[in-house]
Image (spheres, rainbow, N blue to C red):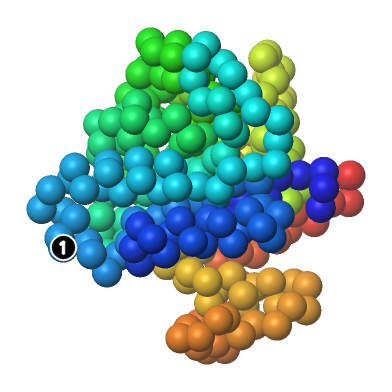
Amino acid sequence: MTDMPIVAGVGGSSTRETIRLAHAAANAGADAGLVILPAYYAASLSTDQEQIIQYYVDICKGSPVSNSTPIMMNGCSSNPQIPLFLYNFPANSAGLDMSSAIIEAVIRQAPNLCGVKLTCGGSVAKLVRLSSFINSEPSVNSCRPYPFLLLDGLISDLTPWMKCGGHGTVSGIPNFAPAASMRLWALLNKPDLTEDERREAERIQSILSNADVAAVPAGVRGMKYVLHKLHGYGMDPRRPLLRLGEAEGEQLMSQFKEMIELEAEYSEAA
């Protein structure tokens, strides 16, 4: 997979462990790391959010140095490191939800932060504020060897996300509907759409959004079940999660029916 970057999840239960995982991921060939907050300390972290800022600053400083040629950009970092993404996912971090102000503070203090992934309520509003901040602060990008990325975690938001300054989404739905998802992506990146293309984009977005609504509560167990039914992959998730029951799985498949038909339509046309 040398033609695409690999982003490894490296969030641990402490600063030291997260840095260790980032080094391990880099040694294994990862191009970047994705860091969620340590859920075990959620109660304590919520009492003083300066701790959250410092957590990301520390792990960005401690991320492994890459094998690339040293870079100098406007006096900023001279030794390139494996870049890290901040991952705001309250559902998987004991309810901790970082505000755009907290994220902005991390961006200012951690030049090795290459982007954020927002899988949270109010994500588009946070995107608008962060996009405005980045556009008003040229140093955000000039101090990095890469453009800072604003990524969504749900394809259901992709159309407004792209219109408000976002750069894309990292979603589970394209695992089931890659051709339809890429068609939507292509349409949203066109500067001018015909009326037929606009209607096509709206249709794809609507169907994928409905599937996303079903996918979120189903979680990993549901995703494994559907992938098994569609492609023959094993349906057992990593423990402690257990296999989704057959009744629940078939209900999820029925909720995905329109998306599966949409994907077949675009796969045949490809």
In-image side of 33 versus 19 (left or right): right
**Nearer to the camera, 33 or 155:** 33
Q: Amino acid at mark 1?
A: Ala
User: Which of the pair 231/196 is nearer the observer?
Assistant: 231
Q: Is 59 left, or right, of 64 in this rendering?
A: left
Q: Quarter of the image holding residue 38?
A: bottom left
At a point 25% along the width and 59% down the height, the residue shown is 95
Q: Position of residue 103 (x, y in %)?
A: 32, 36
Q: Which residue is mark 1?
A: 43
Q: Quadrant of the C terminus?
A: top right
| Residue occupying the point 18% across, 45% down | 49
Residue for point 56% across, 25% down = 78
Q: Is residue 4 above or below residue 16?
A: above
- Does 198 sit above or below residue 25? above
> Can residue 173 be seen?
no
Q: Secondary structure at mark 1?
A: helix
In the rendered image, the vertical position of residue 19 relative to residue 219, given as above or below? above
| Quadrant position of residue 83 | top right
Residue 187 percent across, percent down from the top left: 69, 28
| Residue extending farthest left | 47
How far across and down, in percent of the image, does residue 46 sit? Answer: 16, 54
Give the image quarter of residue 227: bottom right
**37 lies left or right of 24:** left
Circle 1 crowding by C-alpha within 10 Å: few under 14, some 14–19, many from 20? few
Q: Position of residue 82 (x, y in %)?
A: 58, 43
Instruction: Compare residues 78 and 21 and report the one nearer the observer.
Output: 78
Q: How many badges with numbers are in the image?
A: 1
Asked if residue 184 shows in the view, the reply is yes
Residue shown at the point (44%, 20%) measured from the top left: 140
